[in-house]
Image: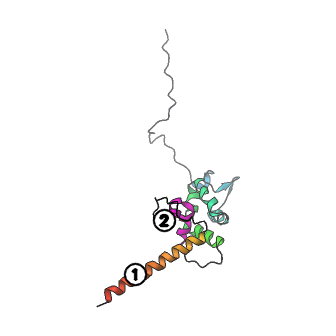
Amino acid sequence: MEIPKAKEDKTPKLYVPVEEFKFHGPLEDDTSNGLFLNDFYFPEEIIMKVLTFLPPYQLLPLSLVCKKWCNIIKSTSIWMDVYNNQFPNRAKRLPWYVYYLYYSTNNFKNLIKTGNAKAEFNDFTRLTQFDEVENIFFKIQVSRLVNLKLNLLKDKIF
């Protein structure tokens, strides 16, 4: 009588011995890193320049393409270029990260509207234009400066 052989276990191993582990090659050889298109390599600067012409709401989902694109899209320089492309003649009163946060999170929009990121007040007016956000942010900065000056003067009064 013949003993049946045990079936091979096709489940993945949790721990791979060091001898069997295979390292990835350099990024230039890896065509899945987002910088290759039809076997042609594009430098990061080219991709960054092309991405700056997209509207911000279309730019954010592209950070899910790969890690390289995520790093490109979350970089300081691309958001400064996007801001300059969207508002070429505007005085630069806001830091670039306010522009990034405005388009990336609903909590930031809510924070600007209400002062509380978790609160959802329906009786507040909804800000729809970035101009409104810029004006509010500028007013907040000015009011903080006025309060700071008053506090400094209060300490110097005899």
Q: Camera-side residue: 67 or 19?
A: 67
Q: Quadrant for residue 68, please give it.
A: bottom right
* Residue farthest left in this picture: 158
Q: Quadrant for residue 90, please give it.
A: bottom right
Judged by its main secondary structure, the magenta piece is helix
Q: Of label 1 and label 2, which has the lower sequence position?
A: 2
Q: Residues within 10 Å of mark 2 (few under 14, many from 20)?
A: some
Q: Name the residue under label 1.
A: 148
Amino acid type indicated by mark 1 = Leu
The answer to if 50 sits in the magenta stretch is no
| First to last magenta residue range | 91-119
Locate the C terminus by quadrant. bottom left
Q: Helix, strand, or loop for circle 1?
A: helix
Q: Is residue 150 above or below residue 32?
A: below
Q: In this view, does 44 lie to the left or right of 149?
A: right
The answer to if 94 sits in the magenta stretch is yes
| Residue at x 41%, y 80% (from the top left corner) | 147
| Residue at x 48%, y 77% (from the top left corner) | 141
Residue 94 in view here: no
Amino acid type indicated by mark 2 = Thr
Q: Camera-side residue: 155 or 66?
A: 155
Q: Mark 2 points at which residue?
A: 114
